[in-house]
Image (cartoon, grey):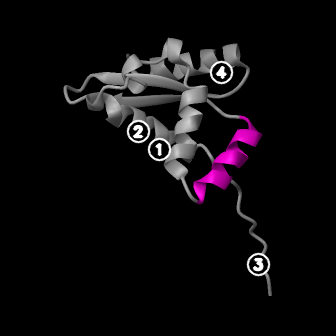
Amino acid sequence: MTNEEILVKAGELSQKENGKVHPLIFKSETDELIVGYLKEPPRHVKLRVMDKGLTAPATAAAEVVDAFLIKEESDPRIWDEKPENDRYYLGATMEAYNLISMAVNQLKKK
């Protein structure tokens, strides 16, 4: 699968899921692509991740992966429990954490 095909599929899934879907692309040790699709979490979930992120950011992001990874469209190695596949789950977790972003007020105070 090419990056373009993966992006097209993410676009199709975004329409099907009625919300933005983010593609996850990892490489195995043999350069095989491990592809997953993560649905953008709603605002209340992002707020919970921000709250929990102060004490347990990885756990908070893992909850996003567990709840919003589109498993039927994603490579099963991403959520597989085998230690050799942990790297893909952990990579997805870090990407889930990176989905939480906010604007910064640009007003300069005196």
The tag earlier along the polypeptide, 1 or 3, is 1
Q: CA gap, disc 2 to disc 4?
A: 21 Å
Which residue is located at x 40 percent, y 26 percent? Answer: 78
Which residue is located at x 79 percent, y 73 percent? Answer: 107
The tag earlier along the polypeptide, 2 or 3, is 2
Q: Secondary structure at mark 4?
A: helix
Magenta residue span: 42-54
Mark 2 vs mark 4: give the one in front: 2
Q: Nearer the viewer, residue 94 or 53?
A: 53
Q: Secondary structure at mark 1?
A: helix
Q: CA gap, disc 1 to disc 3?
A: 32 Å
Local crowd size for mark 3, using a 10 Å CA cut-off: few (<14), some (14–19), many (≥20): few
Q: CA gap, disc 1 to disc 2?
A: 5 Å
Tag of residue 91: 2
Which amino acid type corresponds to the residue marked 1 in the rendered image? Met
Point out residue 73 in the picture as x, y percentages from the top left corner: 50, 14
The tag earlier along the polypeptide, 4 or 1, is 4
Q: Which residue is mark 3?
A: 108
Look at the numbered discs 2 and 3 and tell me whether their residues touch, using CB distance below 8 Å. no
Which amino acid type corresponds to the residue marked 2 in the rendered image? Gly
Which residue is located at x 46 percent, y 30 percent? Answer: 24
Look at the numbered discs 1 and 3 and tell me whether their residues touch, using CB distance below 8 Å. no
Secondary structure mainly formed by the magenta segment:
helix
Point out residue 56 in the picture as x, y percentages from the top left corner: 54, 53
